[in-house]
Amino acid sequence: MLAAALSLGSAQAADQGPRHHAGGTYDAATATYVVTKGDDLIEIGKRFGVSATELKEWNGLASDTIDAGETLKVAADSSASAATPANQYKMTTDIAPGVATPDTLDTSIGTLHLRDGVPSADSIETIYDNLDRSRALQAYLLGIPIVNQASMRDSLKEFGPVNQTDVIWEELVDSRTVELTANDNTIYNFIWIDTHDGPVVLEVPPKSLGAIDDFWYRWVTDIGITGPDKGEGGKYLILPPGYKGEVPEGYFVVRPSTYGNWAPFRTFLVDGSPKPGVESVKQHLKIYPLADAANPAPTTFANASGISSNFVFPGDYSFWELLNQVVQEEPSTGSDPTTLGLFAAIGIEKGKPFEPDARMKAILEDAAKIGAATARSLAFKMREKDAYFYPDSQWRLPFFGGYKFEVAPGVANLDGAAFFYFFATGVTPAMAEKMVGKGSQYPWTALDADGSPFDGAKTYKLHLPPNIPVKDFWSVIVYDTQTRSMLQTDQRFPSVSSQNENLQANPDGSVDVWFAPEAPAGKEGNWIQTIPGKGWFMILRLYGPLEPWFDQTWRPGEIELQP
């Protein structure tokens, strides 16, 4: 029936009229066209809203070659009854504008051909390729947080088994650790928790600051100073998704929506030394299954300081393989139908093998390239004004849309999430909400005062006005635009901090920080080395930020290029 209906098209071709191409004579009565010099099938097809393939079929052409003077059919054969004007039928009504689709559409993916609303075979192929490409790009951007976590988990497992190992930077994180925007001011501790086999207990040390993020990289709870233990230390019980068993008393109960969870926390220097903080961790930190609470195995401490290691996720085709690995491991209830639907549309679906054919694999490889470049565009040149702390300033917010990444309650901030998870690790309200004297704030910039990217061959200065508003300390750290990790130079720690003994303050209490390949004379204590030919960006960290930061009565200067 469908084939019969489609054959009843009018013999009248959809003539778009003469133009600079396909300007030959058209006979409406016979729906034929006389080829003129310079014509080709594609241009004739454009005039009549058909494809070159259809013209060849209707005219019995074995090739694309046509000659001037040749007469071509430009419409399919039709029955005499089909020539009856539509407005002569009894049930005919006027069709509102925009309902019908023209037979020819000039679009960004090329010229699409349709016959009475039905795309031609070659147009359908083009449309499906574009649909798969667009879904793959969105899947890549939505998958960044998940793949970020998957890479983190795999890297941590190289140091020791999950539910038992604390990867600790006992002498602080230095530039040998390739880790997204890490700091060298506090003692990092990274722990991976997996509850596939049942609940897991995490006993955190006092005076720590951290969080638990699930495998989809959503905040679950704070631990330490901003958590329920309020910095006194305590026992956290992490339950599997949908856990129905008995929950013993004496724990801070945590219910993530995923089995895999990352628990990063930090302790702090005492009089410039990490030793007291490290000792506190080793004395108090314990990780063990709840089933072993009566006799837990000793916690393994793996010192990562000074060790070449990588915690940054891949952006190439292996991105998809990591994403599929997590989708297979975790319950679908941990995500949302739209995100999982995009993943399924490109072949990543729970319980099914990820086996793209050659066409789809090429699309996914291309989407990974475009996705990585898109994330970098969002990171280094965000177009939304709300992503900046001040009008006409280059100082950027780390959380664009808050720690939930929303433009309004229940409305996702897609650009803010893609940028952050491409750029950083660790999601917690403590880094996004106003917490005077607690938590931390992270203004950052990749552009100088004139809006230009930083050039590693040039000299720049950052002026921090007097009375820098912190209860604890501040720091400036420089990062590599490629790896989003500490810039690897001759300096083990590419930073300047109020914790540094050789920091020089100006007579009024302000501080100038210098960025250059070589230290300006007499400014060695306030200098961070850069590399000619390599870009960089920086983060200003404020620990225990005070009210003048939040009410903006104090603000850092823009980073100025020096003559």
Image (cartoon, rainbow, N blue to C red):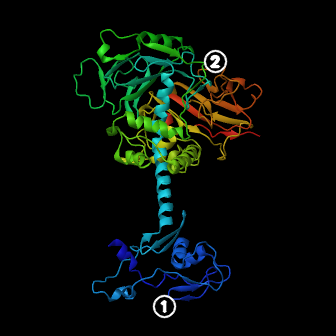
Query: How many other residues sit within 10 Å of disc 2, few (<14), some (14-19) or many (≥20)?
Result: few
* Vertical position of residue 444 compared to residue 178: above or below: below
472 or 427, nearer to the observer: 427
Kindly identify the amino acid type of the residue bearing the numbered disc 1: Ala
Q: What residue sits 36% from the left and 16% below the top?
A: 288
Residue at 51% from the left image edge and 61% from the top image edge: 126
Indicate the position of residue 148 as horizontal and vertical percent values: 49, 35
Residue 241 falls in image quadrant? top left
Q: How many marks?
A: 2
Instruction: Report helix, strand or loop for mark 2.
Output: loop
Q: Is residue 81 above or below residue 511?
A: below
* Residue hosting label 1: 29
Which of 70/265 is in front? 70
Note whether 243 is above or below 234 in the view shown. below
Check residue 261 in the rendering and tell me which mark sits there, or answer none: none
- Residue 176 as seen in the image, left or right of residue 227: right
Residue depicted at 40% across the width and 74% down the height: 100
Where 76 falls versus 297 (above or below)?
below
Q: Quadrant of residue 11?
A: bottom left
- Residue 229, position in %: x, y? 35, 21
> Foreground: 487 or 32?
32
Residue 501, labelled with which disc?
2
Quadrant of the frame with the N terminus:
bottom left
Q: Is residue 398 visible?
A: no
Residue 515 coordinates in the image, percent (x, y): 69, 33
* Left or right of residue 238, residue 308 in this image: right
Question: What amino acid is found at the position of numbered circle 2 in the picture?
Answer: Glu
Residue 533 in the image: state x and y as whole percent.
Answer: 73, 38
